[in-house]
Amino acid sequence: MSVDALAGAVERQAEGVRYVGFWARLAAGLLDLILVLFVVIPVLVWLFGDGWTEGRGVVGFVVNWVPLGGAIIAFWVMKGATPGKMAISAVVVDAQTHSPVDFWQALTRYVGYFVSTIPLFAGLAWVAFDARKQGWHDKMARTVVVYRPR
């Protein structure tokens, strides 16, 4: 870590940056899941019919994951948080500068969710043990989740 980065980290700690922990992030994720269940799924059923979950291969992937991923990435880039994180006053920011994330960080973070989930959710559980409350997806994208400054 460079001297400037270390000085920035000390300054952020002095400013009272609070990282969002495991349980708050789980609650935010559950709120997002409820929104997906009650908003996204009816739209997909309306667009693709009752068989929308039966899609296989590329078509199945596109129908089931691309719209959801696009929405999540758009929320992170434009608002700094998904609706669940907004509800708990949290925001996803760059780990070094605490500035808003860019498209590539958001895309890396979304792909990182798959990496974090595949080994029995170990990468998501990592949030509970990490000093800056980063999951594997956060580490991959160089992001942190912090409470919005008041």
Image (tube, rainbow, N blue to C red):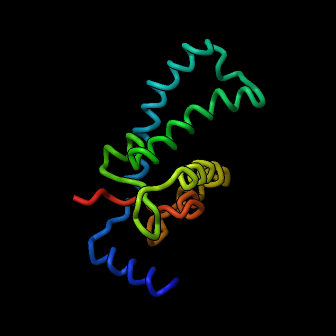
Q: Residue furthest bottom?
A: 3
At 61% from the left and 54% from the top, the residue drawn is 116
At 41% from the left and 52% from the top, the residue drawn is 25
At 32% from the left and 66% from the top, the residue drawn is 18
Residue 49, given in percent of the width and then of the height, sits at 61, 12
Work out whether 111 lies above or below 123: above
The foreground one among 136 and 91 is 91
Work out whether 12 lies above or below 150: below
Residue 146 visible (yes or no): yes
Q: Residue furthest left?
A: 150
- Quadrant holding the C terminus: bottom left
The foreground one among 20 and 72 is 72
Please state if 89 lies on the left or on the right of 25 as rendered: left
Residue 44, given in percent of the width and then of the height, sits at 56, 20
Residue 27 visible (yes or no): no
Residue 99, given in percent of the width and then of the height, sits at 40, 61
**Total number of numbered discs in the rendering:** 0
Please state if 150 lies on the left or on the right of 71 as rendered: left
At 60% from the left and 61% from the top, the residue drawn is 140
Q: Residue furthest right?
A: 57
Please state if 82 lies on the left or on the right of 141 as rendered: left
Displayed quadrant of residue 35: top left
